[in-house]
Image (tube, rainbow, N blue to C red):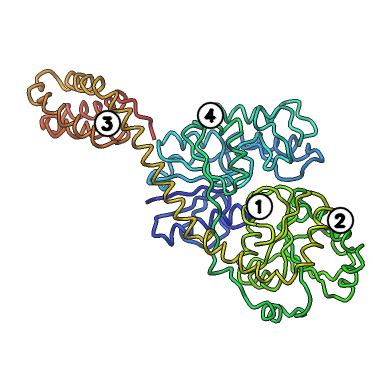
Amino acid sequence: MKIVHIATVDAEGGAARAALRLHKGLLHAGQESVMLVKKKASNLSTVFQIDFQGTHDSFFYNTLQTYCIDFNRSSLSNTYYSLGHPGCDLSAHPEVKKADVIHLHWVAGFQSVHSISRLQKLNKPLIWTFHDQRPLTGGCHFTAGCKKYTTDCEKCPQLLDDRNNYAATNLYEATHMLHREELVVVAPSRWLANCARESLLYRVSRVETIPYGLETDVFFQVNRKAAREEMKIPTDGIYLLFGADYGSEKRKGFSLLMSALQICLQQPAFLQAAAEKKIRVLCFGRPNPELVSLAIDIQNLGYINSDEQMRLVYAASDLFLLSSLEDNLPNTMMESMACGTPVLGFKVGGVPDLVREGVTGFIAEDVSAEGFAGTLLRALEKKEAFESMGTAGRKMMEDHFSLQNQASAYLELYEDVRRNLKQKWHHTFNSRLPLILPEALRKYTAMAGESNGEVLRRKEIEKRVATLLTNSGLREEEMADLLKKVVDEYDPLLSEEGPRKKRRRASGGWLGRIFGGRKA
């Protein structure tokens, strides 16, 4: 099967890494999978960067993004907010034309509702994996608790001044440009699937839940002491781990995490353990700079771009702290569990899909600094269970979240969508065929010339074409081509070079219009 994935980036950020992992899983499963991206960061030969400099109105949209969005954000959220323009039209790209399935991922700054609507006109199965909430909103990538995406996105609370109703306009445009009932949505978490089902845009779409997959042969358990020795850090004590790409992003909850650690440090037992360095903190990524103010031993590992190094970091840690206030299905949570390290997080987004209280980690029910601190103190009282929780988490990842499991689930979905699409066309054509076919042949005969009526053997052609089309379930443009070929076979006079040749070619176009096929 030929699958074409479309994404803005292929290896930078959680959504990009998730899309790339699926691509690798499908390749490993023997499928013909390629990626078309705006920015290529990997060295895979099956990933192609598209030279997209924008459209003639890119300057207008970029200016609008900068001054009306970026400089106009409220204090509610600082997560990325995108207008959704301009978009790169890939409908004529050779890889897309050859595709059996088109699969969209995180496409902000690369695809618009206009370019996606052109992809839909190809009449190919179109799958869209949501990596955040942007596809179902008018601009925000996470809603910060707002539910306006279920109605109209009027007066967006993430903008200081939305007098021009940018979000509502975006949402309105999407409802009118996209054939949503023909689009299949995939959400990696149950939370995001529910958001899609209740959204104004996709409540009419088919929505499926397929979790991310992970390279369980890359992220696996390593002896904790050996991992610490290789990292050249002290081998004794409890290590708490946290990290993210951007520690200043509000929805990541790092300010709340620091407050939670400060609350813990007010507890005499925790404070003493921190002072004696029996409890230490490891962090990676770009953490909040205020982290150094905490009275606890903290080692900032910086940005790590090696999976092998990240495996050591997870394996060296006793507990992974996930302070996200909004999230889909965090890659870091999955990687930590695959390496045998239990996770502590809030009951938000896709976290409860993997973190089972007392089994694979700990859930903080109260989304607050006090709630997180209380859960952390409770977890430390059960530190003897960390190892068994880590083993349970590893088994969960092996059994349900491997790349093989993810690829198999998507392949099953691809086949089902292709089968349903073929049946839909089959049903449509069969209902139209009794009226369309005789009229098509009559017009073809008239264009070819009355003298060729005998040669065409109309009844025989009609019977053969009807049989072929009834059993084929082909798309309309394929049906028109088939009809033309059959007629040509019974019309040798029109296959000769000469003036009639032009008529034959013109008739092919006529048949395409008669059948009403969409131009790819």
In the picture of the structure, the residue carrying the numbered disc 2 is 259
Using a 10 Å C-alpha cutoff, classify the residue at mark 4 as few (fewer than 14 neighbours), some (14 to 19) or many (20 or more). Answer: some
Q: Is residue 98 above or below residue 159?
A: below
Residues tagged 2 and 3 counted as in contact (Cβ below 8 A): no
The amino acid at mark 1 is Pro
Q: Position of residue 300 (x, y in %)?
A: 78, 68
In the picture of the structure, the residue carrying the numbered disc 4 is 177
> Reading the chain from its start, which is encountered first: label 2 or label 1?
2
Q: Say which residue appears at 68% left-offset and 64% top-offset.
A: 342
Distance from disc 2 to disc 3, alpha carbons, whole Å, reads 67 Å
Q: Secondary structure at mark 2?
A: helix
Using a 10 Å C-alpha cutoff, classify the residue at mark 1 as few (fewer than 14 neighbours), some (14 to 19) or many (20 or more). Answer: some
Distance from disc 4 to disc 2, alpha carbons, whole Å, reads 45 Å
Q: Secondary structure at mark 4?
A: helix
Distance from disc 2 to disc 1, alpha carbons, whole Å, reads 23 Å
Direction from residue 118 to residue 478 in the image, left or right: left
In the picture of the structure, the residue carrying the numbered disc 1 is 352
Relative to the observer, which residue lies in front, 416 or 505? Answer: 416
Q: Which marked residue is nearer to the observer: mark 1 or mark 4?
A: 1
Distance from disc 1 to disc 3, alpha carbons, whole Å, reads 51 Å
Residue 480 is labelled as 3
> Reading the chain from its start, which is encountered first: label 2 or label 3?
2
> Reading the chain from its start, which is encountered first: label 4 or label 2?
4
Q: Is residue 437 above or below residue 258?
A: above
Q: Which marked residue is nearer to the observer: mark 4 or mark 2?
A: 2
Residues tagged 2 and 1 counted as in contact (Cβ below 8 A): no
